[in-house]
Image (cartoon, rainbow, N blue to C red):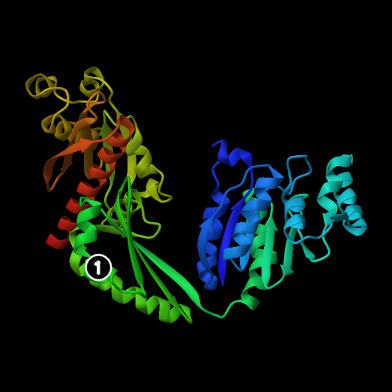
Amino acid sequence: MKAEIVPVGTEILLGNIIDTNSSFLANQLPLLGIDLYFISTAGDNQKRLVDTLKRAWERADLIITTGGLGPTQDDITREAIGELVDEEIKVDERLWQELQDLLRRYLGEIPQSNIRQATIIPSAQIVPNRMGTAPGWWVEKDKHTVIALPGPTDEMKMMWQDGILPKLRQKTTGEIILSRVIKTFRLAEAKVDELVAPISKLSNPTLATYINPDGVYLRVTAKARGRTEAQRLIAQSEEQIRNILSPYIWGVDDDTLGSVVGELLRANDGSLATMESCTEGLLCSAIASSRESCAYFKGGLLACCDEAKTAYGVDASIIERYGNESTEVAKAMAEAARRNLKTAIGLGVGGSINPDTNSGNAFIGLSSGKFEHTFTHTLRGNHSRMKQRTVYAALFDLRKMLLEEVSCT
């Protein structure tokens, strides 16, 4: 079965909202063995939406729309689907009565415009909406299935789980598509692609590489009759990838560098404190955002100027001798953070970022009772990207040191 998702809404095209619905559905469809080849966004214009749906009809068996099911004049998904399948849209009196009862109960009034949400075409089945006023549609015609879901994400997800997923399972062959994402750092995308070229030639599982702020990701995707077989195929490719890229792999799937570092600290009863300058609190946020961070992260100090660094305990003579941003100062910041917050490990991060040339250097300092290390990394990109890369470089260096400490014990 081939699918196409059609998000509806001019607000998506204008960038006013981010289309998270398509991301959710794109993750769900492979679990049913359904291939998704296109996501086609259409604005609140009936002619353009109908044209978009017609193109989807020509190349997909399953069309899923999200949005455009509200009560206002620009909610035109129902009318567009009616035009697509050449059926007249009419008010369903039973549905309108149920909707009036709902509105009266929760709003105390019945806006007449809500009657649009009680309209239906003959081939449509209503998909109940337990969280809102916009019911969905399930339309089957001429060997095609068209599903209309509301735009609010919580409503869409609930209706998908309760009303759509069980029915789609009955229509699919039992095949599933599973993916595993392997995350690397410190290698260019072209280099990763070159190293895994022999694996990339496989047709099942398939392998794709793509870049993210925290490194280059490899997505291994397998299609099989069952989860066990798909997992076996993925495991074979993952083993090959790890044999090639092991020093650069830091996580998989939903892992973040912050959570991976946290797991290592928890496993060794470690504690961490940070001091950062050029990253403006991003380092602290990346570590503290992990759910269990309170077990190992004592806090972060933000030092945007030399006075703050010295106030936290960095020796002014080090700044005077080596400059306000240097590896020596980063190491002193790590030591001061560890001292102030009484932790096993201190991490200091500074950098010299020149937004005019889109270049700079990141300075990383690590300090514990067992080791002291410093690192310098050359950066490229805009100001925001270089700050992000500095944080990821620092966490990757910390992870490396923690792994080395574990291997030595």
Q: Position of residue 352 (x, y in %)?
A: 20, 27
- Hey, which quadrant is residue 245 in on the image? bottom left
Count of residue discs: 1
Picture residue at 64% right of the left edge, 64% below the top: 161
Instruction: Give the percent coordinates (x, y) of residue 402.
Output: 20, 53
**Is the residue 307 above or below the residue 49 in the image?**
above
The kind of residue tagged 1 is: Ile
Q: Is residue 89 left or right of residue 207?
A: right
Which quadrant is the N terminus positioned in?
Answer: bottom right
The residue drawn where x is 69% and y is 57% is 148
Q: What residue is drawn where x is 64% and y is 56%?
A: 53
Where residue 328 sits in the image (x, y, percent)?
Answer: 11, 31
Q: Residue furthest left?
A: 321
Residue that mark 1 sits on: 241
In the rendered view, tell whether residue 28 sits above or below residue 13: below
Residue in the image at 85% along x and 41% along y? 113
Judged from the image, the secondary structure of the residue bearing numbered disc 1 is helix
Q: As rendered, which of 115 and 288 lies closer to the eye?
A: 115
Towards the viewer: 173 or 243: 173
**Horizontally, is 327 left or right of 2 in the view?**
left
Asked which quadrant contains residue 246, the reply is bottom left
Q: Position of residue 348 (x, y in %)?
A: 21, 35
Quarter of the image with the C terminus in it: bottom left
Q: Determine whether, in the image, residue 206 is placed left or right of residue 87.
A: left
User: Is residue 151 in view from this perspective?
Assistant: no
The answer to whether any part of residue 301 appears in the image is yes
* Residue in front for this viewpoint, 200 or 181: 200
